[in-house]
Amino acid sequence: MKDASSTLTAMLSSARPPKGARRDAMDLIAKVAGGCLVRDLVFLAPNAAIDRRNRVPIAETKDGEIATIEAEVDGHMPAYRNLPHRVRLRDETGFLSVAYFRGHEEMLKRMWPVGQKRLVSGTVTFYEGMRQMLHPDHVVDPAKGEAPPPVEPVYPLTQGLPGRTLQRAIGVALDSVPEAPEWLEPTTVKAHDWPDFRTALEHMHRPASPEDVAPESAFRTRLAYDELFARQCALRLRRAHRRKEPGRPIVGDGRFTSNLVASLPYAPTSAQKRSCEEIFSDMGQPAPMLRLLQGDVGSGKTLVAALAMARAAEAGLQSAMMAPTDLLARQHGATLEPLLAAGGVAMAVLTGRDKGKERKSILARLATGELNVVIGTHALFQEEVVFHDLGLIVIDEQHRFGVSDRMRMVAKGFAPHVLVMSATPIPRTLALSIHGDMDLSVLDEKPPGRQVIRTVAMPITRADEVIEAVADASARGERAYWVCPLIEESEAVDLAAVQDRYEELRERFGAGVEIVHGRMSPNAREAAMERFRAGQAFLLVATTVIEVGVNVPEATIMVVEHAERFGLAQLHQLRGRVGRGDKQGSCVLLWKPPLGEGAKERLDSLRRNDDGFAIAEIDFRMRGAGDMLGTQQTGLPSFRLVSPEAHSGMLGAADKEARLAIERDPELAGARGEPLRLVLKLFGYEEAAELARSG
């Protein structure tokens, strides 16, 4: 088995192009396949298949269908001016004209000798009442036993790359792949009646029927499960390895955390208490924590983070909290300052905006350990930011930071514990895939007193009524958001542009209206949002840049224009920007008639639900996993064979099998160890296989 594994690994890792392939063709193939390895070619899944088994007489062909016809060459009509070269075919039922534009006459006459039979396959069309086939896909000589492929896979292509060239390269690569040892549990394979890995690859690229290449086929499903299983094994190995890394436990004495809790006007929720216990338990371990705190809008993540940082301060260690923008960093500072001060914890905010003496003072206090907590942006990465003893890193809106960002902060301390936070609820099954190398804490209840936001949907023809409601709210000292999906008018899609709506509302309300969109500079955008937050403006017209993180307690109305164009989870995030103070919040969803069934279901679901996790499940069911299975922030290769819509239901089973496999044999030294190492390498997780080898 070891020989088979090493042979397969060598074959699939080979970067040699198929024999005889031109260098420029291989460059194009590499562009499509994601590389130039044999693995990249055999893992390039077809997106369709052409059925060429339909052999019919000429008279029975239909306009627009693909047909395979055996007929005799009756004659040639050479090209004339702008007309194509035509070859006339005949059988006992009628005539078919095969046409070539810019075809070489002598070559075509050799290819189509008059009086001989040919098998031709391609799309039949009708031209001036006659059947014709333009540039057929296949022309072969049946007398030599030749035939077009009965079912031909269709691959994604790039400009300048002929499909036949790619097919040949994949065929050569496939022929070099030997049999593989089985890495899945026999019970899994038997339960699904799946073929082995090599057979599944063969059928995907050389299908016996078009159904063989469909994402739902047993062949593609087997390969997709292999890919999910390999990824979950890699995540599980990373987690197991991380737990063995040298670190230091953080054990507090409770003096800061108890003072902080005692200062609260309310009791923490049971979800907050549970999450704190999980985080404190992780921080108390000798291995560095890597935990995701996931909670809906308003579920109280900030308090949990404050308690974690207070716990680190009790042990004499510093904490750094990273936010994606200056505005959010300062907002966190304003929220956390009274909490941490009540606990006896010293903190400061440090962003790119801080200059001169104030900046020098903060840096000096950090270096001496006088500051327990610093809250900042990417400015914290800079070399001049030196900690006395960094023990905890908190990353807010972690999807806005890459893995490399996290590593740069980790390098500023001795194996600091890491807590990442996300306000975007996702189904637990997906969390296993996206964040499977992290431990997970979930805030699934809201603090007492948090009001449900009234949500209504109405046609955009009633926008004037909404504008008057905004005017009434302004008179009461309240503020509002008005969100539009575009920045400038599009002729293709009739959507209100944010600029047009801003000018209309500015004309109605004057200087009390601000605008924010993605094409503004970060400084201009944050200045406008700061004016809104400070009350210098009462209405903020924006694109979805205000979706996450902005906290303005006085904001009570969220208007979403063309709400039918937004995703369900996105609408829920926008709704969560209002009702954060002591006044009732309202969300108005303006839609443009006619409203499609899918959009109607989305808007109705939002009106009926206030729970972000329930909404995430509905969103997942309605549109599939979509890009929720994205991998940009996990440092993992993107999927090649997994179709999120067809295969996301297998995530849980693949993760369970991976967990059991790694728990039984964390060093991959047992009977299944070699096949497991092989599947990790095949799908691009070599480093995970090395982690197992190093123990």
Image (spheres, rainbow, N blue to C red):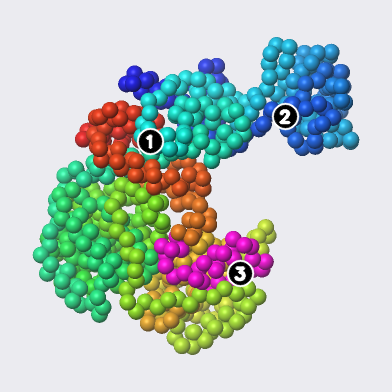
User: Which residue is disc 2 drawn over?
Assistant: 54
Q: Nearer the viewer, residue 156 or 655?
A: 655
What span is colored magenta in the figure?
A: 588-616
- Residue 545 relative to residue 302: left or right: right
Q: Which mark is residue 37?
A: none
Measured in 3D between alpha carbons, the distance from the residue under mark 3 to the one under mark 1, in whole angstroms, is: 50 Å
Q: Is residue 650 visible?
A: yes
Nearer to us of marks 2 and 1 is 1
Which quadrant of the structure image shows residue 293?
bottom left
Q: Secondary structure at mark 2?
A: loop
Q: Nearer the viewer, residue 60 or 27?
A: 60
Nearer to us of marks 3 and 1 is 1
Earlier-in-chain disc, 3 versus 2: 2
Using a 10 Å C-alpha cutoff, classify the residue at mark 2 as few (fewer than 14 neighbours), some (14 to 19) or many (20 or more).
some
Which quadrant of the structure image shows residue 142?
top right
Is residue 170 shown above or below 277?
Answer: above
Question: Which amino acid is tagged 2?
Answer: Asn
Earlier-in-chain disc, 3 versus 1: 1
Residue 694 on image: x %, y %: 22, 33
- The residue that appears at 57% across and 38% down in the rendered structure is 214
Earlier-in-chain disc, 2 versus 1: 2
Is residue 8 shown above or below 356?
Answer: above
- The residue that appears at 30% across and 50% down in the rendered structure is 438
Residue 475 on image: x %, y %: 49, 88
Using a 10 Å C-alpha cutoff, classify the residue at mark 3 as few (fewer than 14 neighbours), some (14 to 19) or many (20 or more).
many
User: Which residue is disc 1 drawn over?
Assistant: 187
Measured in 3D between alpha carbons, the distance from the residue under mark 3 to the one under mark 2, in whole angstroms, is: 47 Å
User: Which residue is disc 3 drawn over?
Assistant: 591
